[in-house]
Amino acid sequence: MMRIAVLAVVVLWLAGCASTPVPESGRNTEAAMLNVQLGTGYMQRGDLEVAKRKLERALGQDPRLAAAHHAYALLLERLGEPGKAGEAFRRALELDPDAPKLHNNYGGFLCRQGKRDAAEKQFLAAAGNPLYKTPQNALVNAGICVLEDGRKADAREYFERALEADPRHPGALFRLARLTAEAGEHERTRALLRRFHEVRGHTPESLAMAIRAERAMGNTSAVESLILLLRGKFPGSPQAEQFKETAGAVRDEP
């Protein structure tokens, strides 16, 4: 009986809430959020003109809505206005400084602008947020960005950390495999690529990398099998043309 009484009180309380007028500011925010969702959808479909109208309407409805500034920043970059995009990102962070997705996207923007040190800080801010559900994405982005400065050791650390968060992250697996291959760690490369193929499937690039790793370890039968797989699945790829079989021996074509 007590449980029924409590439920009855909750139902009455909700009914009272539903009849309470929503403040004008609340209505504006709801309308702005709707326009952000619409604008983001148009942006994803490539209709940037309509997306711009929707997002500018959202900003007019609620200038303090961080999500509107965030989406507008992404749009402005696509429109080739990086200066304005940077301003919109910074305004969004002023309004919502703890938003991990915002830090991650701002980091991507900064990296594309060549501001890699600043970008790295944004990626780490995103990855370090305990509420961020996919810190591995920010860590992979950090690794990609620092690689552009030739910081292979740091990139490797970020990819390793990404795999600690998500052992099946295809981007981390592939990029770490490329670094281990360059370092001559062929067994590690093989293990990483096997996991990559389980998660992502074969690609011409991953199969070519696997062929080189097996060849470096002297595994002729594995090399031949992988070449047949590469040429069978991707016959027109540059990687398939690169590897040829001659008199039962496998070699790289120059």
Image (cartoon, rainbow, N blue to C red):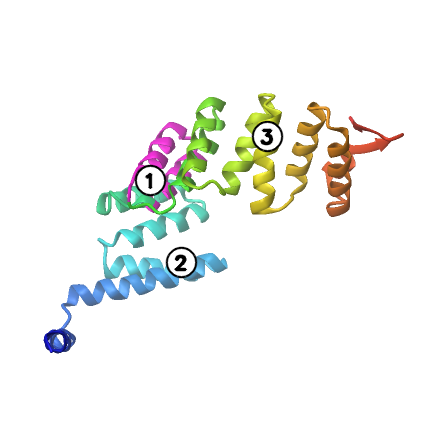
Q: Of the two numbered discs 1 and 3 on the same chain, state the one appearing first in sequence.
A: 1
Examine the rendered structure and indicate whether residue 7 appears above or below residue 60: below
The answer to whether residue 50 is left or right of residue 229 is: left
Given residues 191 and 33, the one toward you in this image is: 191
Name the residue carrying label 3.
189
Name the residue carrying label 2.
40
Report x, y in % for residue 104: 37, 41
Question: Within the image, what quadrant is residue 22 found in?
Answer: bottom left
Q: Which amino acid, by three-letter code, is at mark 3?
A: Thr
Quadrant location of the C terminus? top right
Name the residue carrying label 1.
126
The answer to whether residue 240 is left or right of residue 10 is: right
Given residues 186 and 55, the one toward you in this image is: 186
The answer to whether residue 227 is left or right of residue 160 is: right
**10 Å crowding of disc 2: few (<14), some (14-19), many (20+):** many
Report x, y in % for residue 240: 75, 38
Q: Residue at x 44, y 27 (%)?
A: 157
What numbered label is drawn on residue 3? none
Q: Of the two numbered discs 3 and 2 on the same chain, state the one appearing first in sequence.
A: 2
The span picked out in magenta is 101-130
Q: Residue furthest front?
A: 1
Q: Which amino acid, by three-letter code, is at mark 2?
A: Thr
Query: For residue 98: magenta?
Result: no
Query: For residue 107: magenta?
Result: yes
Disc 1 to disc 3, C-alpha distance: 28 Å
Examine the rendered structure and indicate whether residue 16 appears above or below residue 129: below
Examine the rendered structure and indicate whether residue 135 appears above or below residue 24: above
Given residues 211 and 39, the one toward you in this image is: 211
Disc 3 to disc 2, C-alpha distance: 39 Å
Disc 2 to disc 1, C-alpha distance: 21 Å
